[in-house]
Amino acid sequence: MARNSGRVLAVAGACAAVSLVGQCFLPGPQAAPVHEVSTFNPALAASAALPVLTMLAEDAEAKYGDSRRWSAVLVPLTTLVIPAVAMGIFTIYVSSDDAFYQ
């Protein structure tokens, strides 16, 4: 009985696959598309010229004094202030009544 139901299931699957094959493929084009006459597009010309203009620019690099100044601000901010604020907010949230409410 189990063999018979397995064969029926296999035949039903094959029939479903054959019926869906026709929907999987698209028909070919009926006629070749007509090419339009191209016109000048100023936006396209400007976007093509941008890489050439960037070669003329000076390299963007920080001077030695600038990096020391930013390091003096960003290192304590990212290692002390932001983690302390995040841990404080988490502690206040966990100690509230709604923290583990379901």
Image (cartoon, rainbow, N blue to C red):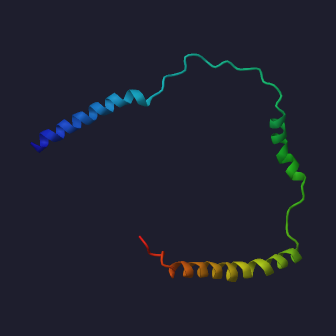
- At 83% from the left and 79% from the top, the residue drawn is 68
User: Within the image, what quadrant is residue 58 found in?
Assistant: bottom right
Nearer the observer, 40 or 79: 79
Q: Position of residue 60 (x, y in %)?
A: 85, 63
- Residue found farthest to the front: 97
- Which quadrant is the C terminus positioned in? bottom left
Is 25 drawn above or below residue 71 in the view shown? above
Q: Which residue lies at the image location 84% right of the left edge and 45% below the top edge?
A: 50
Q: Residue at x 88, y 77 (%)?
A: 65
Residue furthest left as drawn: 1
Task: Specify whether 10 is left or right of 40.
Answer: left
Q: Residue furthest top?
A: 31
- From the viewer's perspective, is 61 left or right of 92? right
- Residue toward you, 68 or 85: 85
Quarter of the image for residue 69 reads: bottom right
Residue 47 drawn at (x, y percent): 81, 41
Q: Quadrant of the N terminus?
A: top left
Q: Is residue 31 above or below residue 43?
A: above
Q: x, y (%) of residue 49?
A: 85, 42
Residue in the picture at 55% in, 82% down: 91
Rendered view: 51 above or below 21: below
Observer-nearest of 74 and 83: 83
Residue 35 found in image quarter: top right
Number of numbered markers = 0
